[in-house]
Image (spheres, rainbow, N blue to C red):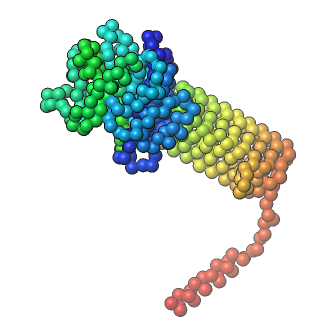
């Protein structure tokens, strides 16, 4: 997506708030939604407009934010004192010295704003009526303490007022100010210099630039979006609500793209989950970051996947865990209570029950019996297990890495294999069975007599 052809774009994201209601040592804008910090959601969406400049305004906890955006082409501006949104935006002036173009003002704790909405704001700024500012408005079910926008049918703003300063008639209006704005750089900082703090909170309000521009004879405009898109996060409860909104959007998108979700409300995606058409996902499945599911795969109930690639026609679960580095090739099968970590299962390979396969390369058509584990860690280092095509690993086997099992080899059930197995070889590693007829009967008799004697002495 490209931005308006009229001018370059700069993005200012306000992230200086204390976030005390989160009761966390983690900066508010770094709390994750779908496995990605809120601030990075916003930067990703803004990035679709290819902005020439990006500035994040920080305050308390600035070191955390700086680390999170390092290497992302973001400039940092510091608001040492929290004196209102107008004051916060003014701190970006130095970072935008020499910039001439449009400025989009966003909030780090309002992470769900879509690139399409940002684009619409910039386009409206270049409308035929040439508005001074464009404000993003919304109509919540409960307008509560939001600032109000009084506008005509064409969206031209007559007045904007903070709830604390609004009269009864203004509070009755349900069109609210999200705080997000688009304005030309040539106007923004000149208007901010004129903003005062003669209001109930004693703060410098960003929306005041709208009325200052109006006093110069230059009207502003409002465009509207859904209230869910501008939902903000100031508490853990609001974070959970935003997560729910994001997940609902993603589930709907997946189903539109041809994915079957048997119980949509029980499936949770990460921000980067990739799922092809004709994939079926059963109830209670959780995706961590870095998962790609290819066409025709089935993810059965109660599975957790992270950092994994699932090939076409693969079956996973129920109750399976795929950890980072898991790769399941075409028509492989991973069954109940199986864990795969940093391992590849070749085409048609099966690990159907109660197994751990870690740091391994498993060939095509391999059968891994129930209870098999690859012993990949010696307490200091990880080691590789390699299993050749069509090998059969019997139940309850331990493959002690580093070890290689050859093609068409058989490892007998209950074996602990610590040396390589050649192609086509049978490896059986068990202690000799000792049989003592009648021993168990004599043992039980002795124990019963002892127990009876103990009861008599109580």
Q: Residue extending furthest bottom?
A: 457
Where does the image place residue 118, in percent across and percent down from the top left? 41, 22
Residue found 39% across the figure and 14% down from its top: 123
Q: Which residue is more in the foreground, 419 or 50?
A: 50
Q: Which residue is more in the foreground, 166 or 297?
A: 166
Q: Is residue 52 above or below residue 198?
A: above
Question: Is residue 9 rendered to the left or right of residue 126?
Answer: right
- Whether residue 254 is visible: no
Q: Which residue is more in the foreground, 124 or 388?
A: 124
Q: Which residue is more in the foreground, 425 or 108?
A: 108
Residue found 76% across the figure and 74% down from its top: 436
Q: Is residue 81 above or below residue 371?
A: above
Q: Residue extending furthest left?
A: 168
Where does the image place residue 55, in percent across and percent down from the top left? 46, 29
Number of numbered callouts drawn: 0
Q: Is residue 174 above or below residue 235?
A: above
- Whether residue 96 is visible: yes
Residue found 32% across the figure and 16% down from its top: 132
Where does the image place residue 418, in percent across and percent down from the top left? 80, 54
Residue found 37% across the figure and 33% down from its top: 88
């Amino acid at each position: 997506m490209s931005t308006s052809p009229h001018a370059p774009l700069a993005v200012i994201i306000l992230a200086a708030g204390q976030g005390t209601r989160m009761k966390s040592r983690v900066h508010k804008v770094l709390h994750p939604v779908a496995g990605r910090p809120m601030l990075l959601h916003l930067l990703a969406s803004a990035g679709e407009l290819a902005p020439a400049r990006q500035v994040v305004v920080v305050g308390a906890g600035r070191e955390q934010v700086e680390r999170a955006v390092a290497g992302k082409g973001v400039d940092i501006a510091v608001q040492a004192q929290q004196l209102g949104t107008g004051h916060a935006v003014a701190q970006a002036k130095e970072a935008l010295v020499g910039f001439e173009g449009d400025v989009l003002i966003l909030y780090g704790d309002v992470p769900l704003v879509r690139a399409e909405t940002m684009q619409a704001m910039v386009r409206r700024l270049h409308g035929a009526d040439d508005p001074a500012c464009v404000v993003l408005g919304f109509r919540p079910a409960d307008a509560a303490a939001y600032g109000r926008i009084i506008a005509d049918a064409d969206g031209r703003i007559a007045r904007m007022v903070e709830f604390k300063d609004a009269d009864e008639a203004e509070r009755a209006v349900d069109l609210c100010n999200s705080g997000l704005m688009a304005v030309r750089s040539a106007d923004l900082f000149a208007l901010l210099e004129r903003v005062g703090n003669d209001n109930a909170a004693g703060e410098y309000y960003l929306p005041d630039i709208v009325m200052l521009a109006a006093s110069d004879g230059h009207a502003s405009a409002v465009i509207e979006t859904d209230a869910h898109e501008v939902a903000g996060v100031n508490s853990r409860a609001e974070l959970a609500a935003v997560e729910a909104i994001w997940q609902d959007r993603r589930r709907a998108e997946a189903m539109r793209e041809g994915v079957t979700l048997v119980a949509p409300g029980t499936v949770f995606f990460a921000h980067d989950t990739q799922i092809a058409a004709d994939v079926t996902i059963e109830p209670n499945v959780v995706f961590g970051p870095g998962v790609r599911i290819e066409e025709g795969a089935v993810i059965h109930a109660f599975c957790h996947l992270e950092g994994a690639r699932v090939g076409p026609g693969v079956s996973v679960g129920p109750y399976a865990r795929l950890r980072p580095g898991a790769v399941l090739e075409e028509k492989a099968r991973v069954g109940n209570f199986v864990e795969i970590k940093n391992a590849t299962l070749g085409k048609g390979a099966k690990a159907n029950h109660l197994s751990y396969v870690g740091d391994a390369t498993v060939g095509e058509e391999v059968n891994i019996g129930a209870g098999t584990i690859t012993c990949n860690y010696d307490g200091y280092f990880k080691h590789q297990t390699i299993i050749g095509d069509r090998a059969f690993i019997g139940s309850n086997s331990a493959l002690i890495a580093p070890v290689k099992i050859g093609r068409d080899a058989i490892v007998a059930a209950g074996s602990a294999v610590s040396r390589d197995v050649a192609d086509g070889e049978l490896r059986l590693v068990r202690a000799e069975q000792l049989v003592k007829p009648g021993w168990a009967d004599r043992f039980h008799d002795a124990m019963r007599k002892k127990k009876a004697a103990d009861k008599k002495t109580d």
